[in-house]
Amino acid sequence: MSAGSFSGGIRLSISDVSANKPFERIIPSGVVTIPLRQDLGGVCNAKVKKGDEVKVGQVIGESATPEGASIHATVSGKVAEVIKAYPHLLGGFVPAVVIESDGKDEWVGLESSADPLTTIQQAGIVDFDIKPVPLVAKLNEAKSRRANALIVNAMDIEPVLSSRSRLLSERVQEVACGIDTIKSIIGAASVYIAVDENAAQAISAIGSACGGAATIVGLNPKYPQAIDLLLVKSILGKEVPCTEAYCVADIGALVLSVETVAAVGRAMAEKKPVVDRFITVTRSNGTGAKNVQVRIGTPIREVLGHCGISVEGMGKVISGGPMMGTAIANTETPVTKEVLGIFVQHEKDITRFDAAVCIKCGLCVEICPVGLMPFIISGFSEKGMYSKAQDNDIFTCIECGCCAYVCPVMIPMVHWIKFGKAQIMAQRSSE
Amino acid sequence: MGPVTTAILAMGGLGVFLSILLGVAAKVFFVYVDPRIGQVADVLPGANCGGCGYAGCSDCAAAMVEGKAPVNACKAGGASVAQAVAGVLGISAAAAEREVARIFCKGDSARAERKFKYMGINDCRAAMLVSGGDKSCSYGCLGLGTCVANCPFGALSMGEDGLPRVDDEKCTACGTCVKLCPRHIPKVVPVSQKAASLCSSHDVGKLVKEICEAGCLGCGLCKKACPEKAVEVVKFLSVVDHTKCTGCGKCFEKCPTGIIQSLVFTVV
Amino acid sequence: MSLRDIIKMIVVLTIVSAVCGGGLALVRISTADQITYQKIKFIKEPALKQILVGYDNDPVSDRKEIVTGKDKKGKDVATTFFYAKKAGQVITIAFETEAPGFAGNVGVMMAVKPDGTMQGVAVTTLSETPGVGTRVKEDPSFCAQFVGKPLTANFSLGAEIQGLSGATVSSTAVSNAVKSGVELYTKHKSQLGF
Amino acid sequence: MAHIREEEGEVVAVEGNQAKVRIRRSPACDSCSTHKTCGLLGEGETVLTALNTVGASKGQRVRVSLKVEGGVKASFILYLVPLAGLVAGALIGYHSQVLGDKDISGAVFSLLFVVLTFIGLKYYAHLKYSGDQSYNPKITKVVA
Amino acid sequence: MEDYLMLVVSAIFINNILLIRFLGNCPFVGVSSSMSSALGMSAAVLFVNVLASLICWILQKTVLDVFGLEYLQTLVFILVIAALVQLVEIIMQKVAPPLYRALGIFLPLITTNCMIFGVAVLNIKEEYTFMQALVYAISTALGFNMALILLAGIRERMDSTARVPKLLQGVPICLITAGMMGLTFAGLLGLAK
Amino acid sequence: MKAPELVVSATPHIHSGNSVRKMMLSIIIALLPAVGMGCYLYGFAALKVIAISVISAVAWEAIFQKMMGREITVSDLSGAASGLIFAMLLPPTLPWWIIIIGTLLLILLGKEIYGGRGCNPFNGVLVAYVALQLSYPQQMIAWAIPEGDLMTEFPPLQVLRDEGVSSLAMYFTNKDLLLGIPIIGAIGEVSKVALLLGGIFLIIRRTISWYIPASFLLGMVIFSGIFWLSDAEQYASPVFHLLAGGGFLAAFFLATDPTTSPVTKPGMIIYGLLCGVLAMIIRMWSQWIDGAYFAIFIISMLTPLLDKIKPRVYGRVKASVSS
Amino acid sequence: MAARIVKEFTKGLWKEIAPFRFVLGLCSVLAVTTDVKNGLGLGCAVIFVTTMSNVLVSALRKIIPDKVRIAVFIVIIATGVVIVELTMQAYFYSLFLVLGIWIPLIVVNCLVLGRAEAFARKEGVMLSLADGVGMGLGFTISLVVVATIREILGKGTWFGLPVMWEGYPGFEFMIRPVGAFVCLGLLLGIMNVISARGRRKRK
Ligand SMILES: Cc1cc2nc3c(=O)[nH]c(=O)nc-3n(C[C@@H](O)[C@H](O)[C@H](O)COP(=O)(O)O)c2cc1C
Ligand SMILES: Cc1cc2nc3c(=O)[nH]c(=O)nc-3n(C[C@H](O)[C@H](O)[C@H](O)COP(=O)(O)O)c2cc1C
Ligand SMILES: Cc1cc2nc3c(=O)[nH]c(=O)nc-3n(C[C@H](O)[C@H](O)[C@H](O)COP(=O)(O)O)c2cc1C
Ligand SMILES: Cc1cc2nc3c(=O)[nH]c(=O)nc-3n(C[C@H](O)[C@H](O)[C@H](O)CO)c2cc1C
Ligand code: SF4
Ligand code: SF4
Ligand code: SF4
Ligand code: SF4
Ligand code: FES
């Protein structure tokens, strides 16, 4: 199927050297630290205490709500500590369980359940996307809004990452099984699989596995095509009415990343909960890129070591990609469900966005994939004119970063826009 | 008819017409405005800082005249303005205690740990959006000076150690810094307050010890030491009740981090 | 507002207005002559200076208004005659006339000697096209053609007067004005009193 | 394009279910350097009659919501319609010369037409707004 | 017809009442800070300018000229304009209260606007006929409104993205910008007188 | 306390590498052919004007930035670019002190007063140009005569004004006009080939988009075309209007000034068309012989309003009656 | 009392100098400052009108009803203006021709009405006189300052006397409207600098 696109957006010049690298498995050797909050659900309650013996797949954090995702041990061994305040990736503190691996890798499987939703909940599946939401919550919402199109997003969020295309070509069966399950849960009429049109391997693999059950859509990997708003526009030709809390379910679509769907397939077929992440690790100069399958809780330092990336002269370590990823404070930070990839920038490659003055060249306007006038919004935020920023649709911004990327004076536009949004929210909550 | 008569008649006629028109207008638009509102507004500083909680000085003036706001409602104006307002309204102003802002964090660049090197917009509120701020302590001053840049009276300056300083002479206790600081580090206290624990952290002592040499551990030694029972520990943070504190200094000696201290010495 | 207030309002405003009106009328009366003098001086004097010679009085003060016609509505129209004197003797009389040109009227100040010869002609006001019609004012040779001719001469264009090429309309206007001025002068000569 | 505007003011009188509320004229005045001396009478405040739905009493500060026409449309109706009347009157008077002199009849007709448009406007406003309760100001909240 | 066109072009561009003739700076500086105020003010100025200058024109021709009271022009005009604005305000409030509330605020601002008075005087000084006076009044107001709206646009933009030195912010930069706006119209010199 | 190792910042973490300096460099490069032609025609005098203009513009920029306590950013070449563009509009005979006054106005009123690069609502070059046209009119039209078999001492548009359409063919061929040899005019405006070369370079480099120059020239052609078709005796042909005067320089280098032109595609097109049409109106009926520069100056006042024509926002919900 | 009179007089000369400190009556400052002579001429007219209106308003302040006060002020001011108009026509006709409508426009100069409303309405005759003269003089000073800059830069003369070097070619820009706006804008900016300095010093 050919598909539409969107105006604006960019092709990143960084080449995706990792696309054809198969996943390498990383089993943590020593200690794993598993934060008890890894999604937008809530903090899970610790089910273990210091000294407990645990096995891989054993629930160590149970969600406080029925829709939340559980958290599992990812190595077998002994609980070394339950930390009350462990620094979270995005700031703040959450509880975390530290497990000392015994190297045996003993597993416990999921209990069988008639209701696939229960299985998904117990398997701790979230939608592995920029904002990981517990999958059950997402499915329930889609169901209640009668979403009838399921879109499996195998487009990589950012071009330097290739884990999704790779996963699709390696784990076709799991994906197919996951699609079946989810399709039956929400009663979707149609299924689309969005794939980078250049990822020939993935396309042919899924093509032969799915037969006619799903439509495979090859898309131009123009950034940020993988954002669900733009994906539904390209595939379904419809735009989601953008309110402050937009939801693609509003137009009857459910977009799930391919990793999510594969996890569902694995949970249904093999009764395995989520203990691994499938991520791409890249450096700013493109060398040493690898796709890895890594246990949750493994310190990023260990992952980098495995990929042969030295800590020497390291400037920035980014969870995710260079455009939307979160820079992390510390390489001891563990891989969690929130980590979409790892991008390492050396000191000399760090880009400094200055508080410069816009020259109104209009490049940002041309590039913005959602049709905003970024320089105006950012300008109003900077000058504290928040209501005007709101009049100019600040909340429609998806923070893709294209505007800042092209700006010749390097205004930190996304930061200003985030700032504006935060100030508006703060003003509202104080009223 | 001579030219003078013509002129007198013409202008007189215009005068009659105009005054009748104005009479009608006065009926149509009649509004009684308390003349004192204008007088009070003239006395107020006119900075429109909003510290009084009204939408600007003239709003505050109206509230004062109507008795809805006390004569000393204008924090920025201080006692002299309160006196003047009281004069206009013919009531006596209770001598209000002058207040100033104090910085409730001592975690300067040498003593408090940072999680990472922050790079981005030079504003504490913006820094909060990047992984919650670079300071390891999630209660401490970020030191980017949002308060300094926005103090309407120029009373704040950024010290070399990365903490803001208050100029007591200039500070009018308007509260702008209190409102803007994302970590609520500046607090407005009576100028006579003698002692305070200059820390805002509600973290447990163990964590505080790891990340900041200047933090209140919540150990409670000060509370025990205080003869006046002026010190309380609220969620691992000691708080001094200034109405009881005599400034005897007993607590200073006991505090393991020296964070509870005499404010008299901190005045620049 | 009580009735008393309203009455007070009306009375005060009326009195103030009326007093001001009356006062101004007095000021006006006391300055009127001087203003007329000044106006004439500023508007007419440059042209007068151009065409009058050899006088020792102030022609602007030595002036006389004579009713010379009626306008459309039947009101009197007056012409001001300026007397240039030497040793108390009238040597020239100057006055202004006008005639329609290319755009609006062209005003002409002309000076006549008691002996019936033309002392001089100068264009005062005109709104002709700059560079085209305005040449009748800017080019001194055009007006110079009138000087020294007897009033009985034929001042028509093409007769004793040559128009400026490209500005025939404007030139005609000047000659027409002069012609009507001669007529006017002849008609009212008796009233001029010298 | 009508929208709701909120103003804060003080109740100066209560009459039945209506209240007279005094509001400051507009922040637009504050930005003008002449606002202190402008206006012969306008004291920068105005009084409007609002539906007293919340039972506010004299002296209270209240929030009043009023539905107002959007700026552009309102300015059209309020100013440009009478202006159009004026111009039309001037043209008719000028060309018909009813009163003899072109200029004078143009002048008289223009003023006449302005008055007529005002009457028309009143009729229009009456039709449009009197039935529609939402155009009446309403007190929504007692602030203090 | 061409005369009128010239009059219009001249009044709007070549001799823009505000930028070249310097009339009406106070409201120009005050109201141009936001586009919506500028629009509201524009309509009010247009109406009042035309009405006031016509009434003044009539008064001049039928009263002042007839009774030889030309010298009272200044006194009479200013009183008439002030009264007129008041009258319009009363009428507006009676005629269409909702509309009045949305826009009436601009009326008093106009009283001290020297443009209204200036145009009334200029109409007499230039000896315009009634029709010319009408066209002139409309055109000057349009010229004023154009400048006001353009400046409002520039100022809104300046507020969001420019970094005017603090000491020039507000009135100073506003005046300088007005000067430059006038300078741009130099490009139209010669199109009309 | 141990020092942190890693840098953390907001997104994005990488940048395209585009910069003001690169943009300015490309506009300078794009002007080199025109500079070359100017020097070829007018020799050392032209080079002197260009040098004085560029150097003084940069110097004024540094001086005012220093005075106003801003960072000195002459190295971004924006001052140099403005100075160079300004020199392109000047006659090669212009005395040095007039150039210096011009660049003073350019930098002070055209930029620094509003906060420097990017803040100015008016094109600095045009502020200076118009101010000089008003203040020193004789010097601004004191054209130099290039070598070559010239039949007139005036620029083509002056000849059109003075002698009418019929004489044009006698003096100029389209090829002369296109090459600029030997044509009289401002240093940078005579050679259309050189300007076109530069313009295409800018479009290829994506320093400018083609909307503004294309619609500008189109506006000129349409407007002059209408009159030419109605009366070819009295009105010159669109081709002549395109090739004579400052149309090309204005369309490619002045109207495209990022700061004072609209940012959206529809805005740019309307802007260009209006500029083109107004340029012709001024050329035909005003006191100036060429209107291209004046037109941009006037139309740039509309830029803030044209920028209200926004792109279509994704998923825009029609604003309901807000409360 | 004498001290108070001096104070009210001098405040208008610097501390509260009208167009610069409170941005009032800009129109005439822009319009008549092409040369110093015109500026001074209008300034004198304004001095007369402010003084006269201040004195009369102050004298009548007890009997003027509040509701019509502004109307009465306007009548008084307009009367003063007409007196100026008539005398100027009679004795300084050339100046009258140059200033044109700017003489009648004094009526709408906010400064004059502003003084009546803010000062003369409340104070005694002597003080109002001092205030009127001072404020008018301050206004005149402002006009002369702006005019000086414009005339010297624009024409190379001051009061018509050449002050620049011989052959100074003039700078028409300053004589044009744009020069007026830019000059006044920059002067207001400079006043801001001075005020800010003063404030800092006082602190
Ligand atoms: C900023 C500046 C100031 C100048 N001042 C003067 C001056 O005060 N007197 C002067 O004669 N020339 C002045 N000049 C110009 C002389 O250097 C010039 O070359 C010479 O006097 C020729 O002037 P002229 O054409 O009037 O003879 C000045 C030039 C500049 C750039
Ligand atoms: C725009 C324009 C303005 C003119 N202005 C004048 C003018 O001011 N005075 C004049 O005498 N002729 C003027 N003319 C020329 C007349 O129309 C007419 O052709 C001329 O007077 C004929 O005179 P001639 O026989 O000397 O050529 C003007 C022509 C045009 C096209
Ligand atoms: C600010 C300013 C600076 C000037 N600098 C010079 C200068 O440096 N050299 C110069 O010849 N003339 C300069 N002039 C003008 C000269 O004094 C000289 O009179 C001018 O060149 C005109 O004279 P000319 O036509 O005889 O050459 C300057 C004028 C101004 C306004
Ligand atoms: C394509 C292009 C055109 C430019 N045109 C102008 C111009 O016309 N005038 C000018 O002052 N600067 C121009 N500049 C330079 C630069 O934009 C200018 O220094 C700043 O925008 C002024 O704020 C141009 C730059 C570019 C890249
Ligand atoms: S970050 Fe926001 S404003 Fe910038 S390009 Fe992306 S969506 Fe547009
Ligand atoms: S890309 Fe940068 S400089 Fe260009 S308009 Fe956008 S914010 Fe301004
Ligand atoms: S006190 Fe608050 S606002 Fe001030 S520097 Fe510290 S964190 Fe920032
Ligand atoms: S220090 Fe704080 S309270 Fe004091 S004046 Fe400044 S902002 Fe107001
Ligand atoms: S002085 Fe002209 S509007 Fe104020």
Image (cartoon, coloured by chain):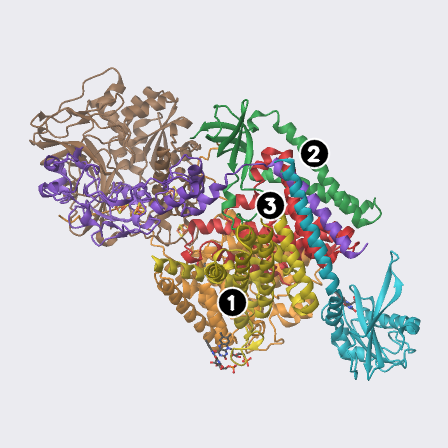
2 or 3: tag closer to the N-terminus? 3
Q: Position of residue C121 (x, y in %)?
A: 81, 76
Which chain is in green here? D
Label 3 beta carbon within 8 A of ligand 9? no
Q: CA distance from mark 1 to mark 2?
A: 53 Å
Secondary structure state at the residue bearing disc 3? loop
Residue at point 35%, 58% (across, down) = G202
Residue at the limit of the structure toward the front, as seen here: G1
Q: CA distance from mark 3 to mark 1?
A: 33 Å
Of residue A357 and residue D28, the one placed in the foreground of this image is: D28
Q: Position of residue A210 (x, y in %)?
A: 32, 27
Tell me the kind of residue under disc 2: Gly
Label 2 beta carbon within 8 A of ligand 9? no
Which chain is in purple here? B
Q: Residues within 10 Å of mark 1 (few under 14, many from 20)?
A: some
Q: Position of residue G56 (x, y in %)?
A: 61, 55
Q: How many marks?
A: 3
The residue to which callout 3 is attached is D40
Q: Position of residue C188 (x, y in %)?
A: 91, 71
Which chain is in yellow here? G
Which chain is in brown here? A
The residue to which callout 1 is attached is G145
Secondary structure state at the residue bearing disc 1? helix
Q: Chain F rendered in what hue?
A: orange
Residue at point 49%, 33% (across, down) = D10
Q: Is residue F83 above or below residue F275?
A: below
- In the shown orientation, is residue C51 left or right of residue A212? right
Which chain is in red here? E
